[in-house]
Image: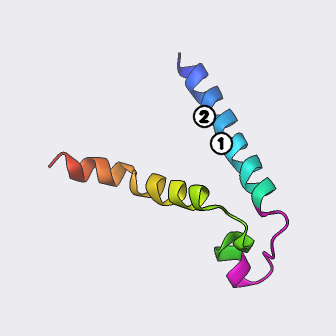
Amino acid sequence: MDSMVIIFFVLFSAFVGIVTYMKTRGGELDTSDGYFLGGRNLTSKVIAGSLLLTNLSAVSFVGMSA
């Protein structure tokens, strides 16, 4: 069971990395503007997902139980 979780985590992390690379490979990542904005190639769904998942951290879950 534990090895399956680790394998799934590694595969999912690789998938996210590949999708991010494919989305940002055509953009200008040389400048700070291009780096922080993903070359202005990211869609609103990707940005919204990033904001949502950033807020769903362990700190948020610990704070919500109080």
Q: How dense is the environment of label 1, judged by Cα within 10 Å: few (below 14), some, or many (20 and up)?
A: few
Q: Are marks 1 and 2 in contact (CB under 8 Å)?
A: yes
Res 9 label: 2
Who's the residue at 59% across and 21% down the image?
A: 3
**At 53% from the left edge and 21% from the top edge, which residue is drawn?**
2
| Most foreground residue, 41 or 65 | 41
* Labelled disc at residue 13: 1
Which span is picked out in magenta?
Answer: 24-34
Tell which residue pokes out farthest to the top in this image.
1
Q: Amino acid at mark 2?
A: Phe
Q: Quadrant of residue 12?
A: top right
Q: Is residue 9 above or below residue 60?
A: above
The overriding secondary structure of the stretch rendered in magenta is: loop
Q: Residues within 10 Å of mark 2 (few under 14, many from 20)?
A: few
5 left or right of 35 in image: left
* Element class at badge 1: helix
Instruction: Please check the rendered image and state whether residue 25 is part of the magenta-colored stretch, yes or no.
Output: yes
Residue furthest to the front in view is 44
Identify whether 33 is placed above or below 4: below
Q: Which mark is residue 49?
A: none
Residue type at the position of mark 1: Ser
Q: Is residue 47 above or below residue 60?
A: below
Q: Secondary structure at mark 2?
A: helix
Residue at 81%, 76% (x, y): give it. Answer: 28
The CA span between labels 1 and 2 is: 6 Å
x and y, in percent, of residue 22 in the image: 80, 54
